[in-house]
Image (cartoon, helix red, strand yellow):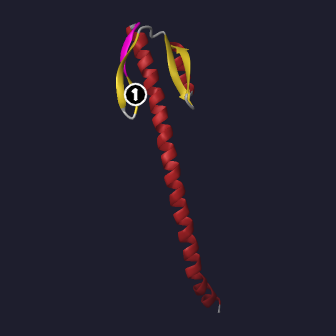
Amino acid sequence: MASRANSSQLPKKVAEYESFLYRLKADLAVVSRQREGLQQQMDAYADLSNNIQTLQEQGQAELTTLVNLGAEVFCQAEVPDTERLFVDIGLGFHVEFTQSEVVAFSKVK
């Protein structure tokens, strides 16, 4: 009797586990995309910190760079004084930092 009850419950249990596995895969995909976004942000702040340290080591007072205007359209920009820089801190806000503040901020962020 007990084996018949277990065998009749088996397809139901398999369906429950398959449903659970499907939800886990969907959740994993969402979390993976979020992780990739965070990794890109972390890489951008690490690059920023490295670039500032390079500026400090070379003693560059001015800089020529490319700026993304959006939709992957770039223009050349000249920064006459690299001592104070504007950094995108998220949500569309930019903060003016000194070079040392940028390095400290990028380590915290």
Which residue was labeled with disc 1?
68
Q: Name the residue nearer the viewer: 92 or 51.
A: 92
User: Which quadrant is the N terminus positioned in?
Assistant: bottom right
Q: Name the residue nearer the viewer: 83 or 21.
A: 83
Q: How many C-alpha atoms fall within 10 Å of the one at disc 1: few (<14), some, or many (≥20)? A: few
Please tell me whether the stretch drawn in magenta is mainly helix, strand or loop.
Answer: strand
- Where does the image place residue 44, in percent across and percent down from the top left? 45, 30
- Where does the image place residue 87, in percent across and percent down from the top left? 51, 22
- Where does the image place residue 70, in percent across and percent down from the top left? 41, 32
- Where does the image place residue 10, in percent across and percent down from the top left? 57, 81
Residue extending furthest toward the bottom = 1
Say which residue appears at 46% left-offset and 27% top-offset: 46
Say which residue appears at 52% left-offset and 58% top-offset: 26
- Give the image quarter of residue 13: bottom right
Q: Is residue 32 magenta?
A: no
Q: Name the residue nearer the viewer: 24 or 95.
A: 95
Instruction: Say which amino acid is labelled 1.
Output: Asn
Say which residue appears at 53% left-offset and 70% top-offset: 18
Q: Name the residue nearer the viewer: 16 or 6.
A: 16
State which region is magenta: 61-66
User: Which quadrant is the C terminus positioned in?
Assistant: top right
Q: Is residue 17 above or below residue 66?
A: below
Regarding mark 1 in the picture, which secondary structure is present there?
strand
Say which residue appears at 54% left-offset and 56% top-offset: 27
